[in-house]
Image: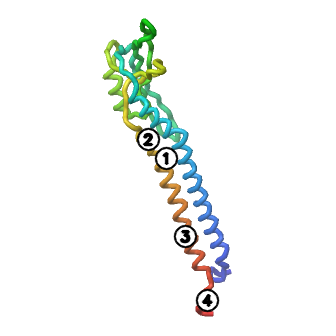
Amino acid sequence: MSVASENPLPAARRGLVIDKAFMAIGILLLLGAVVVVAAWSIPAIREVKAVQSWISAGAEVVHSELKVETSRSDGRTTRSYTPIVRYLYTVPRGDGAVELLGSRVDIAGMRTESDSRDVVSRHTVGRRCTILHDPDEPWRSVLRPQGTPWGAWFAPGVMAVLGAMFVVLPGFALRKKASLQRPNNETD
């Protein structure tokens, strides 16, 4: 059987299936982006904004270390760096005050190695610092405020762009294929 005598229809159907599969993947990516924004990004951004209204208090660092975790996968070694800083701070309570122990460094928690090392070097044991605590729930505290975490929008943004590409590009291909398969009434 020669190549010229093969029926082109199975190849065209394969192309349609592939285009539709890419469109389905794109729709799933778009839905995933919406879920990530709703479940993680919006709450993280709200919490970053809420911290801006918290009350500052003096604190003393009682523990400071850099936690390094190593993982191996597919022959590659990766390391993650987490600053562990615990601090004591005092908040008014009734006629007196209560001393609380905090350990939250920041809201987002997405750090580079150099940022993690910097946090630990600036907050050595015995050092005084200023923290922020929630006036309604004073046991909720943070060592350093921060702006909106870029990761809150980066991951869903990439998912949305890829999803849109996986929907739009195969959609154009399907339209083009459909227009090529339509009979031309002008020549009949």
Q: Residue at x 47, y 30 (%)?
A: 70
Residue 170 lies, in percent from the top left, at 55, 65
| Kind of residue indicated by mark 3 | Ala
| Kind of residue indicated by mark 1 | Pro
Q: Earlier in the sequence, mark 4 or mark 2?
A: 2
- Element at badge 1? helix
How crowded is the residue under tag 4: few (<14 C-alpha within 10 Å), some, or many (20+)?
A: few
According to the picture, the residue beneath numbered tag 2 turns out to be: 151
According to the picture, the residue beneath numbered tag 4 turns out to be: 185
Q: Residue at x 53, y 48 (%)?
A: 33
* Residue depth check, mark 4 versus mark 3: number of the one nearer the observer: 4
According to the picture, the residue beneath numbered tag 1 turns out to be: 156
- Element at badge 2? helix
Determine the CA span between mark 2 and mark 3. 33 Å
Q: Earlier in the sequence, mark 4 or mark 3?
A: 3
Using the image as rendered, state which of residue 94 and residue 102 is in the foreground: 94
Q: Earlier in the sequence, mark 3 or mark 1?
A: 1
Q: Earlier in the sequence, mark 2 or mark 3?
A: 2
Determine the CA span between mark 2 and mark 1. 9 Å
Q: Earlier in the sequence, mark 2 or mark 1?
A: 2
- Element at badge 4? helix
Determine the CA span between mark 4 and mark 3. 23 Å
